[in-house]
Every structure is written in structure tokens, then in C-alpha cells.
Amino acid sequence: MAKNKSEKEFNFKLYAVIVFFGVLAALVAIVYTTFTSRYTAFHPEEVAKTYVDTIVQTGDGYNAYKNSLLSKSRKYGDFIREYYMYPLIEKGATDEAEGYNDDSYKGEKTLGDDGSLQGQLIDTMYPYYEELVNENGWDDYDLIFTSYFDKLTEERKALFGDDYMTDEIMFTALEANVRTYGEKLTGTEDEFDENTGMQTSFKTVGVYENAFGEDYRIVTGVKSENDLDLELYLSQLDEKTLESYKIAKEDISAVKEFNVSVSCGEKEAVVNVVAVQIGRSWYVDSAETDTAELYKFAK
């Protein structure tokens, strides 16, 4: 017996709807998987590994904080400005100026600098930065930022002869020193200006190559992970520090500890990294993570 025409159309439409939503669900699943695999924060073991790897590969504890609680609720740069730069700059506030970043504080050397004196300031600051990191690592960022910017203010005034200071000057000097510290570890290659063809930098042999050989390769991996007692962890948190991060205790839903190994040939170092979950993302608690061994890795 032939089926009713309307019944045929109904079945076809139902089938089309099922197929459509099936394909849509598959696409959503693919997009979600791709997104989460690329977005490190969704994977606590990757957050822990990235934090350690950023430090050990180039000694860059400064940028490692981008994977930490410090950067969860605000831009990293804004945190540094608010707590370490603006307090120094605003010491120069007057009825006419909001701080030392006002043009009225520019002396003759500042007004006439073509970048040469700024470069000299960066070079002058580097030995101090290297000493700070070699002696302390980056676990205590308060010590690093406070000491470095105080010294920078002092050195700039001696070099330029005025009190002028901006957050741009501070970031430029610090980030240049961070980069130089990394290059001391990894070495550099010959580089040439693409327009003039003139050589702008020369090949240097870094600390790691001297210690491990020309083809050294530092490998970072997670050896184990453990769930920690959330209530105990929360009870020990410093609320003033959390407030500076703009985070509340109740935001944190889980806490894990990762045993992260770093190896190069027969040399190995192990770091325990504490990571916490807020929403669907994970962040390193730098206050509970000791990375001192990473700065001694080549020694």
C-alpha cells in the first residue's frame, strides 16, 4: 500500500532536522576541542608546564606571571603600574602636574635625547637586574619590582639630571633587561638590518651552550599531579594579596599540585607547581611555587 504524501514529507523533514542538529553538534564539538587544546588555561598541567618552561628556557620569570593568579582579573601591565610605577611617578604631583611624567619635569638632556641616553640607562641597569634575579629569582615579584624601579629612578636622575619618569621608561628598561638576561642564557645569532645590510648584532655563546653543548635541548614535562585540600588551601591564603589580584576566596573551586621536571641530558631539576581553578580556567599560585632551582639549572 502506497504511503500518504504528507507522511513522506514529514519523515523527510524530520530526518533533515536530525541530520542538521547532528552535524551542528559535531561541529561544536570539533570547535570546542580545538579551542580548548589551544587555550592553555583550560588545562592545568599545561599551565604548570608553561609557567616552568617560560622560566627555564630564558630565565623569564617576568612573563611567566602571565600564567599566574596575578594576571587573572586584570592586565599584567596595569597591576605593575598601579602598585609599583604610579606610586613613584605620583611623588612629583603638584598643583600644576599630576606627577613626574609631566613635561614640566623634563630637563635639557631629556628634551635633547635621541635615544642614546635611554639606551645607556638600560645598559646601566642590566648588571643590577642580573644580580637581583641571580640572587632571588622571580618568585618574590614585590622585591624585584620595588628594588628595580627604585634603582631605575635613582640611575635615571643621575644620568639625565632631572626627575622626569613615565611608565613607558620603566617598562622599556625592564623588558630590555629581561630580554638581555634571556640572551645571556641562550646566546644570540648574527643579525643584519634588512634595509642597509649592516650587521646589528653578533653571534654569542650562551650559558646553556657552554654547560650542555651546542645542540642542547631543555625538555619540560609533568611527572605527576595531586589534588590538594581546597578548604585548607583557602584558609592559608593572604586576603590582601588576593584583593590586589581582584580575586575572592570563593572564586577558587579547586587546587592541584604538579610535579614538573626539567631536563637536559643528564641534568634534571624538579619543581612543585600549585595551580588553582577559577571558572573553567587554571592559574599558577606563584606564592606557593618555588622556582629557585630553575635559575641555577646550568650551574
Image (cartoon, rainbow, N blue to C red):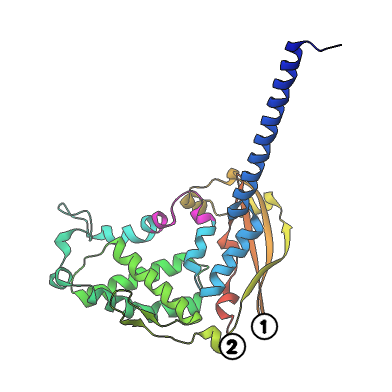
Amino acid at the residue labelled 1: Gly
Q: Nearer the viewer, residue 193 or 243?
A: 193
Furthest residue in direction left, as rendered: 108
Q: Circle 1: is it few (<14), some (14-19), or many (20+) Cα within 10 Å?
A: few
The residue shown at (71%, 27%) is 18
Q: Quadrant of the C terminus?
A: bottom right
Q: Of label 2 and label 1, which has the lower sequence position?
A: 2
Q: Predominant secondary structure in magenta?
A: helix
**Above or below 269: residue 166:** above
Image location of residue 276, percent across then percent down: 62, 53
- Span shown in magenta: 69-80
Q: Nearer the viewer, residue 104 or 192?
A: 192
Q: Which residue is mark 1?
A: 265
In the image, farthest residue toward the front: 2
Which residue is located at x 60 percent, y 59 percent? 47
- Would you name the residue on which mark 2 appears? 213
**Is residue 75 part of the magenta span, yes or no?**
yes
Left or right: residue 76 versus residue 232 is: left
Q: Is residue 131 left or right of residue 49?
A: left
Mark carried by residue 13: none
What residue is rendered at 26% in x and 73% in y?
A: 118
SS of the residue under disc 2: loop
Q: Within the image, what quadrant is residue 283 found in?
A: bottom right
For the residues marked 2 and 1, what is the alpha-carbon distance in whole angstroms? 10 Å
Q: Quadrant of the N terminus?
A: top right
Q: Is residue 6 above or below residue 148?
A: above
